[in-house]
Structures are given as structure tokens and as C-alpha cells.
Image (spheres, rainbow, N blue to C red):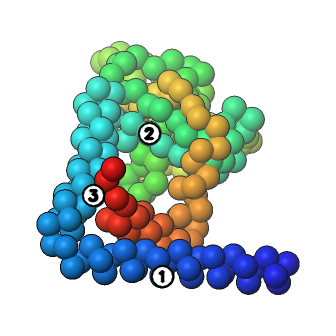
């Protein structure tokens, strides 16, 4: 194992040194450097446009979410990616929804357990995680007994299994996030166009 670790460390150092050499060459050629910076900006803005387009189409502020806990097992595992749609106004008992709670940064993925429609047309929702013993009233804001439709960020319409584990790793180890973004930027800047 020590030999493997040493070999891996050497390979990473060589790769970083090679990228730094390429970056120095690129810096000397201002025109090529500008082209590569614009190329990187195009990638970033394209990703942003796709995200904003998905937000518009699904009417959800977060059209893609990652399941962060095991509260929805066996239906959804930690690390699954869920695709949300909030354009459908009706939700029913049994639907998996993502909702936000006032003063909580991270939305929650759970299933609708009960729907209570009042005479004035207001619909109250009660949710519960499939793997939890009790409903979610303990998770709601103090004094809140029901969710309203405006608390729902979207209904789950699709999933990708375990793809979100990368996101979980990046949140668990924040340094990894900066290293990964830095390396991706470096590779885009130093890559050669054919």
C-alpha cells in the first residue's frame, strides 16, 4: 500500500507540474491565453444557461436535488439525484416532493402522507420519510403543523441512482471542492484545441 500511495503521489505531482508548465507557456502567448479563458467562461455560462432553462421549464427554484440522508430508503438512497417538476399544481398522497422549511437552508425530500383541504380552498400537506417512524411535524418550523403548496419546491419525476455521491463528498470535504474546481479550470485553460 505504501508503494501504491507513493506511486500515486508521484503521478499527481508530475501531472500538476506538467499543467503548470503548460500554463506558463500559455501565459507567454496572450492571444491563446485569452482564447482559453473565453473557452472556460463559455463552459461556465453554458452550464448556468442550462440550469436557468431547467428552472424555467420546471418552474422549480432547484430542478435537480441530491438525496442527503437515508430517510427515504428503500425508495431513494443517499446520493441519488432527483429531477423535480413544480409546473404541476396538483400533488397527491404518495407523491415524493421536495420542500423547504423557513430558516432552513437545506430542502427535505419526503413523501406526502396526508392532504387536508379546507373549505376556503387552501390545501394543507403532511409529509413523512419512508424510513422514518413518525411524520415530519418535528421537522417543520416551530408552531407549523402543515405544509402549504408554496413550501413545495417540486415533485420528483425522475432519478439517477448514486450519481450525487460526488456532491455529498464535496460537501463533507470542502477542500476537495476547491481542488476539483481548480483542477478543472487548469485543465480547460491548458487544453489544446485541435
Do callouts 2 and 1 mark residues in contact (Cβ within 8 Å)?
no
Residue at which label 3 appears: 40
Residue 111, numbered label: none
- Tag 1 and tag 3, C-beta contact below 8 Å: no
* Res 7 seen here: yes
Q: Which label lies toward us, 1 or 3?
A: 1
* Rendered residue at 35%/19% (across/down): 89
> Dot 2: what SS?
strand
Q: Earlier in the sequence, mark 2 or mark 1?
A: 1
Q: Upstream in the sequence, badge 2 or badge 3?
A: 3
Q: Earlier in the sequence, mark 1 or mark 3?
A: 1
Q: Quadrant of residue 85?
A: top left
- What x and y, as percent, mark residue 93? 56, 20
- The quadrant of the picture occupied by the N terminus is bottom right
Question: What residue is shown at x 23% (from left), y 77% (from top)?
Answer: 27
The residue under label 2 is: 64
Q: Going by the image, does 9 lie left or right of 51?
A: right
**Quarter of the view holding residue 53:** top left
Say which element carries label 3: helix
**Front position among marks 2 and 3:** 3
> Distance from label 2 to label 3 (Cα)?
23 Å
Q: Residues within 10 Å of mark 3 (few under 14, many from 20)?
A: some
Spatial CA distance of label 1 from label 3 is: 21 Å
**Residue 189 image point, x, y percent:** 32, 65
Q: Is residue 54 above or below residue 1?
A: above
Amino acid at each position: 500500500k505504501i508503494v501504491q500511495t507513493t506511486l500515486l503521489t508521484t503521478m499527481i505531482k508530475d501531472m500538476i507540474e506538467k499543467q503548470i508548465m503548460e500554463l506558463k507557456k500559455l501565459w507567454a502567448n496572450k492571444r491563446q491565453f485569452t482564447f482559453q479563458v473565453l473557452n472556460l467562461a463559455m463552459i461556465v455560462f453554458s452550464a448556468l444557461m442550462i440550469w436557468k432553462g431547467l428552472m424555467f421549464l420546471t418552474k422549480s427554484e432547484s430542478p435537480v436535488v441530491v438525496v442527503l440522508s437515508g430517510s427515504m430508503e428503500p425508495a431513494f438512497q443517499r446520493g441519488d439525484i432527483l429531477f423535480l417538476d413544480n409546473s404541476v399544481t396538483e400533488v397527491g398522497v404518495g407523491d415524493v416532493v421536495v420542500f423547504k422549511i423557513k430558516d432552513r437552508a437545506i430542502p427535505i425530500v419526503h413523501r406526502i402522507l396526508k392532504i387536508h383541504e379546507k373549505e376556503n380552498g387552501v390545501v394543507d400537506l403532511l409529509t413523512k420519510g419512508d424510513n422514518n417512524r413518525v411524520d415530519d411535524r418535528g421537522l417543520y418550523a416551530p408552531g407549523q403543523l402543515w405544509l402549504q403548496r408554496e413550501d413545495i419546491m417540486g415533485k420528483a419525476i425522475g432519478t439517477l441512482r448514486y450519481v450525487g455521491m460526488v456532491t455529498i463528498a464535496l460537501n463533507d470535504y470542502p477542500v476537495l471542492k476547491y481542488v476539483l474546481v481548480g483542477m478543472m479550470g487548469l485543465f480547460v485553460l491548458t487544453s489544446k484545441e485541435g
